[in-house]
Amino acid sequence: MIQKKYVLLILLCCVSVALWAQPALPDFSIIKGPKNHTILSWKNNFGANLTVLNIQRSTDSVRGFRTIHSVDNLSLATNAYTDSKPVPGADYYRLYYMMKNGSYYFTKAKRIATGFVTDNLLSQLNSSKAITITGDHPRKLAYNQLYHLKDSVVNFTSDSLYFVNDSTIQYVKYNAVAAIASTTTELRPVSKFLYLNADSYIVLKFPQRDLDQYSMTIYKRNGTSVLFKIPRFDHSELILSKSSFMHTGWYPYEIYKNGKLQERSRLEIK
């Protein structure tokens, strides 16, 4: 009996620590649990004004979401849900919630972080040198600090670490804005690089041979603050994820090739 009490106490403490660090709606966290389960958690700062909260799942971050669970106890300040039967390929999750006044919202779509690190990265580096990090998070680290960086990228982000030479690695931040490869052939041109597909989603198209030379900056609707920076593209044709914007409207953008402005205009999120 005493052992059971101790086990229960330990479990409660673990749950409390996990939930304490969770973000508040409309944000949520998503991590990989035991037995490949997917664990979503969040804070409810709306109190009794929150009347409905559904967990939704899809094969991509733009469309096809289906409700897989409706949360019963909405009064909890912190809460979590475990998807014990995740479907291979359907790894995007979002929350749908409704308020007392009838207004409803969707959170941004998220999936479990799957960071990439060049095979045998650490063994290719010179352990006696300070290691230079280039790319999105430039800095210098001692060799023994790279173990923590490598584990963080793999387990808690979708970013990438690439080997450059024995004292340099490149950090590339995951592109969450245009991460969905497009396969449609029915496209209507909007500009030199932007198109609309049959479902009215914005598709970005770049020449494959120069793909690594292009970058994009998308501004908030006021046109003065940066909303997203896309430093590189992984595919020559991609769908622009609507769920990354949260609001409909016109967003100014700029497209660069080797740092030189190629296009400046506005795109519409409907």
Image (cartoon, rainbow, N blue to C red):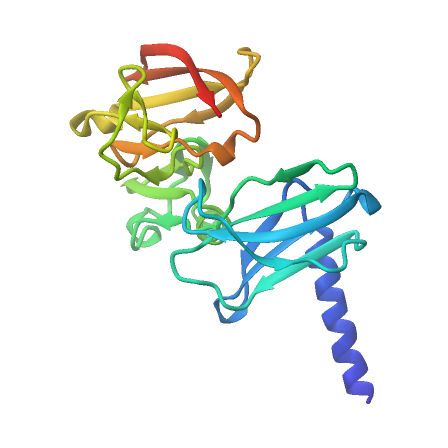
Please state the horizontal and vertical placement of residue 13, each as a whole percent of the image: 76, 66
Please state the horizontal and vertical placement of residue 220, each as a whole percent of the image: 54, 18
Left or right, 266 with reference to 181: right
Query: Is residue 111 positioned above or below 136 on the image?
Result: below
Q: Please tell me which residue lies in front, 212 or 204.
A: 204
Left or right, 270 with reference to 77: left
Q: Exactly how many numbered labels are in the figure?
A: 0
Query: Is residue 14 positioned above or below 188 on the image?
Result: below
Quadrant (top left, top right, bottom left, bottom right) of the N terminus: bottom right
Q: Is residue 112 visible?
A: no
Query: Is residue 258 positioned above or below 203 on the image?
Result: above
Residue drawn at point x = 32 percent, y = 42 percent: 162
- In the image as oriented, which residue stretches furthest toward the bottom? 1
Please state the horizontal and vertical placement of residue 244, each as a whole percent of the image: 50, 33
- In the image as oriented, which residue stretches furthest toward the left? 209
Q: Is residue 33 visible?
A: yes
Residue drawn at point x = 30 percent, y = 15 percent: 191
Residue 221 location, quadrant = top right
Please state the horizontal and vertical placement of residue 145, each as a whole percent of the image: 48, 47
Q: Please tell me which residue lies in front, 253 or 135.
A: 253
Query: Is residue 173 positioned above or below 125 on the image?
Result: above
Left or right, 265 with reference to 105: left
Left or right, 101 with reference to 267: right
Residue drawn at point x = 72 percent, y = 71 percent: 11
